[in-house]
Structures are given as structure tokens and as C-alpha cells.
């Protein structure tokens, strides 16, 4: 979020490449190489991208491609410090603006679910089923609500992030991305 690091996923590989843009001579270095080593990967149906990673409390929460896990990385060392088992292959792993929770959606066949992770305990605290084909999630600027697009149900579901209760259900034709203008000026978002 501060623009210091450029991180890229490596297509077809377990690992990432990172460049520290503050170095006098920036160069790519490999991080999290082989996080799935020795395990048979699952077929990947939807590739996580830009907003697929969350930063919260000095940690990065990353979707483990081809796994049913969220990787937890210490951002001071860029070393893996944990793995959180989740309901399916994560696509977007998004932090509530205060960093207290991370919300995760999934690819086929589990794309009707969203799981909420408590960041201090690094545990899933709730599984929601907002609708078919959950494609994107977006938090309101203060994080009191999250808007979730459910493409195949033609709805956007709005949840209270504290109670995790449904606040509103908005009819919409095949909603996909949800992007509030409040984040337009923030670097890395």
C-alpha cells in the first residue's frame, strides 16, 4: 500500500517475484518459492489478480494458487508465517479497512461462498453463502459494510462487517466488479 514493493505472481509456479523499489538498484527476488512443494495442485479455474492480496497488521494475506489455503506472510521479512485452511481455492483475499478481518471469495465450484478470517487469530470465523458466482467484494470507506456481487443471482448483497448480517439485497443484471470511488486516490488499490 505504500508503493515500496512491486510483487508479481508467477504463472504456473508456486511463488512470487518481488522488487523493493526503494533499493538503489532494484532487482527481482523470489519469495514464497515452492509453497505447494510435494502436494498435487488442484486445477485453477480463476486466477487471482491485483486486489487478490490483503495487507493487515504487518502481514500480507495471499491466495494460495491451486490450494485451499490463504498464505500469511510477515511483510518485514517476506517469509511465510502461517497458512489458513479455507473452503475452496481463494480468488480475492481482501482486508476490511481497519485490518481486523479478511474476507475471502472462491473460484468454481465454491464460488457461492465467502469466508471471514479474524486476522489476530488467523482463523475462519464465519462462512457466508451470499449467492451464486460471487465475483467481487468491496468495503465501504470505513469498513462498516461490504458489497458482494453475485453475478448468477443478478444481485449485489450488502453485509454488515461487524454482525455479518445481510443489510440489503440489490437487484442488478449480472453484476461483476464493484469499485467505490473512495479508493481511487489510494496507491496500490
Image: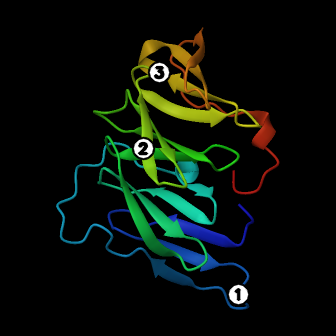
- The reply to whether discs 2 and 1 touch (Cβ–Cβ < 8 Å) is no
Q: Position of residue 1 (x, y in %)?
A: 71, 60
Residue denoted by label 1: 23
Which image quadrant is residue 125 in? top left
Residue in the foreground of this view, choosing between 105 and 85: 85
Q: CA distance from mark 2 to mark 1?
A: 37 Å
**For the residues carrying marks 2 and 1, which lies nearer the camera in this image?**
2
Helix, strand or loop under label 1: loop
| Above or below for 28 versus 145 | below
Q: CB of mark 1 within 8 Å of CB of mark 3?
A: no
Q: Dot 1: within a 10 Å radius of its alpha carbon, few (fewer than 14), some, or many (20 or more) residues?
A: few
Eye-nearest disc, 2 or 3: 2
Q: Residue 41's x, y, as percent?
A: 22, 58
Q: Residues within 10 Å of mark 2 (few under 14, many from 20)?
A: some
Question: Sequence-wise, which precedes: disc 2 or disc 3?
Answer: 2
Residue furthest out toward the front: 121
Secondary structure type for disc 3: helix
Pointer 2: what residue?
124
* Residue position for label 3: 151
In this view of the protein, which residue sits in the foreground, 44 or 168? Answer: 168
Amino acid at each position: 500500500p505504500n508503493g515500496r514493493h512491486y510483487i508479481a505472481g508467477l504463472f504456473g509456479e508456486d511463488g512470487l517475484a518481488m522488487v523493493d523499489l526503494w533499493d538503489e538498484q532494484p532487482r527481482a527476488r523470489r519469495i514464497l518459492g515452492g509453497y505447494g512443494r510435494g502436494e498435487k495442485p488442484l486445477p485453477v479455474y480463476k486466477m487471482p489478480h491485483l486486489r487478490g492480496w490483503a495487507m493487515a497488521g504487518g502481514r500480507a494475506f495471499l491466495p494460495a494458487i491451486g490450494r485451499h489455503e490463504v498464505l500469511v506472510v510477515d511483510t518485514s521479512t517476506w517469509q511465510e508465517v502461517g497458512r489458513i485452511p479455507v473452503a475452496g481455492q481463494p480468488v480475492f483475499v481482501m482486508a476490511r479497512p481497519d485490518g481486523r478481518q479478511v474476507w475471502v471469495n472462491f473460484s468454481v465450484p465454491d464460488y457461492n461462498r465467502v469466508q471471514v478470517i479474524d486476522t489476530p487469530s488467523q482463523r475462519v470465523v464465519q462462512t457466508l453463502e451470499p449467492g451464486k458466482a460471487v465475483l467481487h467484494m468491496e468495503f465501504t470507506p470505513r469498513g462498516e459494510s461490504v458489497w458482494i456481487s453475485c453475478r448468477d443471482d443478478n444481485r449485489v448483497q450488502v453485509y454488515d462487517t461487524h454482525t455479518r448480517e445481510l443489510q440489503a439485497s440489490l437487484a442488478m443484471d449480472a453484476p461483476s466488479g464493484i469499485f467505490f470511488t473512495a479508493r481511487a486516490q489510494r496507491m496500490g488499490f
